Amino acid sequence: AQRKGKSPVFKSHTRTRKGAVKLRSIDYAERRGYVRGVVKEILHDPGRGAPVAKIQFLNAYRFKRDTELMVATEGMYTGQFIYCGKKATLTIGNVLPLKQVPEGTIVCNVEAKVGDRGAFARGSGCFAVVISHDEEKGTTRLRLPSGGKKTVPSKVRAQIGVVAGGGRTDKPLLKAGRAYHKYAVKRNCWPKMRGVAKNPVEHPFGGGNHQHIGRPSTVSKEAPSGRKVGLIGARRTGRLRGVKKLGQDKD
């Protein structure tokens, strides 16, 4: 909605969060060899469906230890050694550049650009699949959790395995109180009121003696904001019948 722009009402609730979940910032050791870290603990991050892992590395330049918050992959445990870098082995939880990873490997927390520390497949139970490598272009094709395909540089890093916390949506929320607590810790986006249940001043679909839309539910993408509700710039409507055709499967 329009109101969700610059207003404090819809800001995300970050007070209890554990911190930004990222890969290590890329350094010489990861580019050339590998570094070893140890999983100190696996934490629940409020407002996130997936657990996060606190991983401790030795600093290469100063006498200290660096702790990083990373996505916990399924099968990770405390005390486990995690290896990050070009020479790391293909084991669950390790962080490797995609060019070191064979085709068909299941990866998660994949970077979009080299050194951005993780962009794709980070939600609970998510994973991306390495489809193919293009050696001369230096790119790699991925299948993302949405089913779409994406080409990324082969030097971007990814964690091996599936994000932990999968199957979270299998159990229904059952009652409004659970949904209330689920979204209270995320941001103000619940409960969602239907447009037809509103008054005409509040929504283009509002009003009328029966709850009905009373106009097409599709709307032009050139429509002014405020009118732009429903199915915006729709090419087609209705449910997808027959074989599942993904728009990205053209190649």
Image (spheres, rainbow, N blue to C red):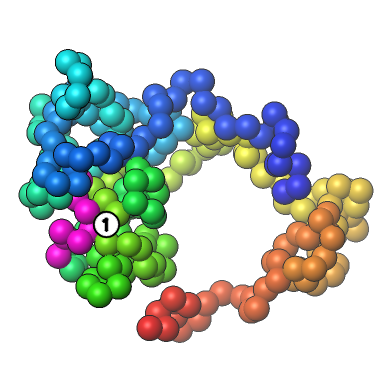
Q: Is residue 67 left or right of residue 248?
A: left
Circle 1: element type:
loop
Residue 131 shows in this picture:
no
Q: Is residue 155 left or right of residue 175?
A: left
**How many labels were placed on the picture?**
1
Question: Percent position (x, y) of residue 245?
Answer: 44, 80
Q: Which residues are magenta?
A: 95-102
Question: Percent position (x, y) of residue 143?
Answer: 33, 66
Question: Percent position (x, y) of residue 208?
Answer: 90, 58
Question: Percent position (x, y) of residue 19?
Answer: 40, 27
Q: Residue at x 38, y 53 (%)?
A: 113
Instruction: Name the quadrant containing residue 249.
Output: bottom left
Viewer-side residue, 156 vs 162 = 156
**Up-down relation of residue 242 to residue 92 (above or below):** below
Residue 216 shows in this picture:
yes
Extreme residue toward the top, this view? 63
Q: Is residue 109 left or right of residue 62?
A: right
In magenta stretch: residue 49 = no
Q: Residue at x 63, y 32 (%)?
A: 11
Viewer-side residue, 83 vs 71 = 83
Viewer-side residue, 155 vs 191 = 155
The residue where tag 1 is placed is 155
Q: Which three-letter amino acid code belongs to the residue tagged 1? A: Lys
**Up-down relation of residue 220 to residue 97 (above or below):** below
Q: Residue at x 13, y 36 (%)?
A: 35
**Which quadrant of the figure contains the C terminus?**
bottom left
**Up-down relation of residue 218 to residue 35 (above or below):** below
